Amino acid sequence: MDIALKQNSISLNLMDNKIKSVIEALKFSKIEKVLSDALEDMPNTNPVNYIGDLNRADIMH
């Protein structure tokens, strides 16, 4: 009986770890998408000026 309980406990721990790893992967996937979208939306002409505008906007707040 103790062996069966230990096996179930191990099985539940493995499932818990798997669920946590899937959740973390989804978080990273979402972060990658947000960063990718932000980089695609940046103007291609002169990124240095764009970054300067961002810094000026931060200072004004």
Image (cartoon, rainbow, N blue to C red):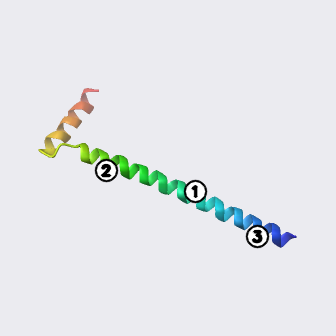
Residue 8: give x, y in percent of width and height: 76, 66
Mark carried by residue 20: 1
Residue at x 65% of width, y 62% of height: 15
Question: Sequence order check: which comes first, mark 1 or mark 3?
Answer: 3
Question: Sequence order check: which comes first, mark 3 or mark 2?
Answer: 3
Q: Amino acid at mark 3?
A: Gln
Could you classify mark 2 by the number of other residues whose Cα lies within 10 Å: few (under 14), some (14-19), or many (20 or more)?
Answer: few
Mark carried by residue 7: 3
Q: Nearer the viewer, residue 48 or 16?
A: 16
Residue at x 23% of width, y 36% of height: 54
Question: Sequence order check: which comes first, mark 2 or mark 1?
Answer: 1
Give the position of the C terminus as an image quadrant.
top left
Q: Amino acid at mark 2?
A: Ser
**Residues at discs 2 and 1 in contact (Cβ within 8 Å):** no
On the picture, is 24 further left or further right than 39? Answer: right
Which residue bears the numbered disc 2? 36
Q: Amino acid at mark 1?
A: Lys
Secondary structure of the residue carrying tag 3 is: helix
Give the position of the N terminus as an image quadrant.
bottom right
**Residues at discs 1 and 3 in contact (Cβ within 8 Å):** no
Q: Tell me the CA gap for discs 3 and 2.
A: 43 Å
On the picture, is 59 further left or further right than 4? Answer: left
Residue lying farthest top?
61
Secondary structure of the residue carrying tag 1 is: helix
Q: Quadrant of residue 3?
A: bottom right
